[in-house]
Image (spheres, rainbow, N blue to C red):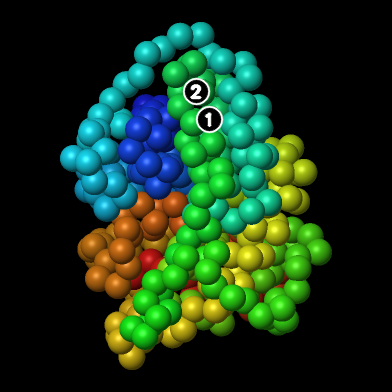
Amino acid sequence: MIEFRYLQTGLTGMAQAHRANTMAGHLGAAVVAGVFFCEDHPDLPPEVVAAVQGELDRVIAGGEAIWFDQKKAGVTIAELFAPLPGGDPDPAAAEGIAAELAMDIANLRQSGHDAIFAAIALRALRDHPQAAAPAIAAGLRKLIAGFRGGSQGRGYFGKAKGWLQGADVALPDDAGIRAYADEDAMVEAVIGELIDSGGVRRQGFGGIFHLINHAAALVELARMGYADLAREGRAAHHRHLRLLRALPDVEAELGPLGKAKHDPLTAAYWAEDKDSEQWSAHLTHRIKTLYGFHTLLPLIEGETTRQKALDAFRYLMA
């Protein structure tokens, strides 16, 4: 298990992310997600737990600085993780975060990060209500509120078109992707996308990383009793999938994707660990997506499909 202090530090990073921008929430969210990943897998080899904790240390130390310009923002990564004032836990902290998310969850915001960050924060505060100091609760609400009315995300459509905002992408009425009837249909669509295109080189809309994490967030929201929020959020996830499918394969421009040789739940994987040469923001994305993918994995029906998903997942871990 990873020490509890990492959860508190991660929540602090999330609660202060609004001082930079909403996407700075990646930093603290990755730290909390790493705690949950190890908590959900108590039988992980000690080498894996140590490796994940080492990644969290790298995040906290500023090892991934792409999310905001520290000089322009007037705040450093170290300051985002600096302790906040304590105080008696806010008993309404979780419901306040859920209320902020409810304001716009039906619309796609930054490739689903409003739902992703909110679900991580909600699990942390519901499992550990003593962590909900007033400053933490207020900061988390500000983070989620910051997504309201914002960008859907952006995607790269090749040299000719470049990067386009999601709102500017014209999707056909019939994109061959039916609206999700329920949670099972959403998970089936996500896993199918991973299996079919995990090795396809696309850029933007968070890639399959965030398609997985967005779905996992909605699954977690439902598990925590926010079934209405999860149901409303499936419309945004459906658009997320359609936008991702609209992206072209840019392998000819950027090269083919590599694939991890080992299962990331094994010591062998982390023994060969190195910074990814094919994915940006892999420090935070890898940890969050290990958590997200293994949230969905138990919901996959059929051993053959499960094994295909595990195999395709290694493209994301390379």
The x and y percentages for residue 258 are 33, 79
Which residue bears the numbered disc 2?
138
CB within 8 Å, label 2 to label 1: yes
Left or right, 243 with reference to 316: right
* Residue extending furthest toward the top: 88
Which residue bears the numbered disc 1?
141
Which residue occupies 41% across, 12% down? 86
Q: Name the image quarter holding the C terminus.
A: bottom left
The x and y percentages for residue 54 are 27, 45
* Residue extending furthest toward the right: 181
In the displayed structure, would residue 168 be above or below residue 6? below
Left or right, 122 with reference to 205: right
Give the CA separation, mark 2 to mark 1.
5 Å
Q: Foreground residue, 303 or 101?
A: 101
Left or right, 13 with reference to 182: left
- Residue 199 seen: no
The x and y percentages for residue 50 are 30, 45
Left or right, 99 with reference to 161: right
Task: Check disc 1 and give the amino acid type.
Answer: Arg
Q: Name the image quarter holding the N terminus.
A: top left
Q: Foreground residue, 304 or 159?
A: 159
Q: Foreground residue, 189 or 50?
A: 189
Q: Foreground residue, 150 or 81?
A: 150
Q: Give the label on residue 223, or none.
A: none
Task: Check disc 2 and give the amino acid type.
Answer: Ala
In the displayed structure, would residue 289 be above or below residue 313? above
